[in-house]
Image: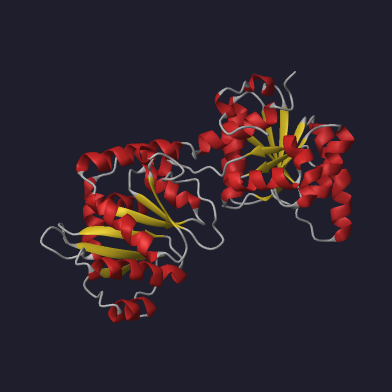
Amino acid sequence: MTPWGEEDIADHQCLFGRTILQLIPALEPGPEAFACIETAAALDEAGARALVAGGEGPLVSELQARGGVFLPFDLAARNPITASMNRSRLAVLAEREGVELIHLRGEAGFAAALHAARRLRIPLVAEDFGPAALEADTIVVHSRQALEAAEAEWPHLAQRFVRGLRGVDLHASLSQPMDPARVKKLREGWGVRPHERVVVGLGLPSDRQKFFLLAAAQLAKRNFLDNEAQEVRFVWRDAEGADLSSGPFEAEARQLGLDRHVLRVAGGDPAAACLAAALVATPAGDARLSVEAQALGAPTAVLQSAADQYVETVLTPPQVDPARRTGWIIAPDQPSAFARAAEEALRLGASAREALALRGAEHARAFSAERMSALTLSTYARHFRV
């Protein structure tokens, strides 16, 4: 197992002059293509030759601009004859290009990648997609929970598992200081008055609307949302262009007596929304949102679903000391826990909020694209160290 953090001490000099081939079904926008391009750029900086083979897509030009070399290859072929021929084709391609390590991103093309690696006697790195991936020399898993489960199920293969990371591009949100006018414009567009504080639901799936409203209702019942000390609004942010005509959200809000305390909005500047909020609620299923929110300094609550049993993007007691908290993790079916988190966030003083923001921003950097690339290069380097 490669421990989390080995990238800080890894010597990437052993990659200099090496030729590394990444395989991806297509360079279409998405986390796999993002990771592929970031890794290619890091390889280029390390003096390695970064090849990417797969289907064409709109990100081919970005890959090439950042130092990668694109080789068209029908990795996701469904025709059995083509898929069978791909084995020899990929081996010929890898031999011709002098490939010294293959990294397969996803399940498509595994048989061809394994054949080429074994024929050329070079390492194969595969993303975790189930038992078939165990034939690879290294299997990359993307959470501590998955790593522990894999090592428990296949203890004799524990050395093959390494900890990977789905990195987040923090440059877009942090490249320029936030103009306060952006936040003001957003709040005005929402119809939120200057003195009102907001709890924002960012990227939450529609099936969490009732959960969101029940938490608000608990605070409203205790007169916490509207008193002499403060006024608070719970803001549900729908996707850009969503229909804001009256629907289940509004009906549920009326039934709970929350007409004055909640609103539903469509789209808007997500970075400004984070800075406008006393608390940002994000889904555990989209780690990117909680990382970006913390990077911007927003107090962040991650709402778990039944499928999200482990959250790493936010630090919270009892996993860490209360002084190291960066946000809140809310278990499924516990709107009262979300209400408590909102109350704690809204009661934070200026110094406490600033300290929380600094801790959150520091923790967010652990999930950056740069760290993802460093981890990936460390995974490659382990195959070349003498």
- Give the colouring mode of the picture: secondary structure
Comparing 168 with 92, the one in front is 168
**Residue 11 % position (x, y):** 62, 20
- Regarding residue 307, the answer to whether it shows in the image is yes
Residue 287 versus residue 259 in the image, above or below: above
The residue sitting at 77% across, 30% down in the picture is: 100
Say which quarter of the image contains residue 78. Answer: bottom right
In this rendering, position of residue 8 left or right of residue 266: right
Residue at image coords 89%, 44%: 88
Q: Quadrant of the N terminus?
A: top right
Q: Is residue 372 left or right of residue 320?
A: right
Dividing the picture into quarters, in which one does residue 4 lie?
A: top right
Q: Position of residue 371 (x, y in %)?
A: 53, 34
Q: Is there any visible trace of residue 66 in the rendered image?
A: no
Q: Position of residue 197 (x, y in %)?
A: 22, 57
On the rendered structure, is 153 left or right of 173? right
The C terminus: image quadrant:
top right
Question: In this orientation, which residue lies closer to the viewer: 28 or 207?
Answer: 207
| Residue 342 falls in image quadrant | bottom left
Answer above or below: position of 112 versus 331: above
* Residue 308 on image: x %, y %: 54, 57
